[in-house]
Amino acid sequence: MNRRSFLNWVGIGWIASSLPIAIAACSSKETEQSTSESQEWQEVGNADELKTNGKLLAKNTSVGEVLLVKTSVPGDLVAVNAICTHAGCTVEWKADKNKFVCPCHGSEFGVAGKVEKAPATTPLKTYAVKTEGDKVLIR
């Protein structure tokens, strides 16, 4: 192998090994943008419906289905992604147990979205929630 061939192979190797770093640097900017966009409050329902029913299922939000419930814990309003992390079914709020329960396979999640009963292993995503006038907002 002559010197020119050796330098070509070293150059190609350097470019190939740098490619994942360049891709990661570009994708982190996209992640920062989506994170900053998700930091804005968005309306997901009516406060009167939440007061009347004690829960509110918002299906057409930018983050997917969101289930908001009034609980017996301090702060009393909780918002979670309503899709079970195990089977993709819509979880239900069981006020008597103070838990979210998946009707498909029986997974149970606590008020903070943490798995309390398998088969699910990943917690439900939670959102900050507040009411302003007659609007319910999440972030």
Image: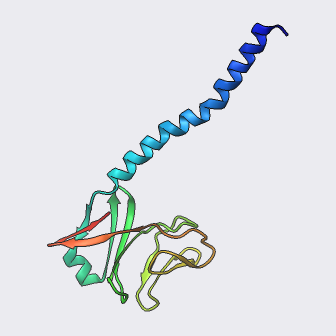
Residue toward you, 28 or 99: 28
Task: Residue 24: give x, y in percent of width and height.
Answer: 54, 39
- Quadrant where the C terminus is found in the figure: bottom left
Quadrant in the picture for residue 74 = bottom left
Residue 42 x, y percent position in the rendering: 26, 60
Number of marks in the image?
0
Residue drawn where x is 46% and y is 69% of the image: 90
In the rendered view, does 123 fall on the left or right side of 54?
Answer: right
What is the residue that sits farthest to the right in this orientation?
A: 1
Instruction: Decide which of 99, 74 is in the foreground and name it.
Output: 74
Residue at the farthest left position: 133
Residue 123 lies, in percent from the top left, at 53, 70
The residue lying toward the viewer, choosing from 42 and 66, is 42
Q: Is residue 11 above or below residue 45?
A: above
Residue found at the very far bottom of the displayed protein: 96
Q: Where, by quadrant of the figure, is residue 96 drawn? A: bottom left
Image quadrant where one finds the N terminus: top right
Is 111 left or right of 85, judged from the image as shown?
left
Q: Is residue 33 above or below residue 83?
A: above
Q: Is residue 111 above or below residue 15?
A: below
Rendered view: 19 above or below 139: above
Along the line of sight, the residue nearer the viewer: 36 or 48? 36
Q: Which residue, as the protein is rendered here, is positioned at the far front?
A: 3
Q: Which residue does the image show at 54% across and 35% down from the upper left?
A: 23
Q: Is residue 25 left or right of residue 15?
A: left
Residue 93 in the image: x percent, y percent?
42, 81
Coloured how?
A: rainbow
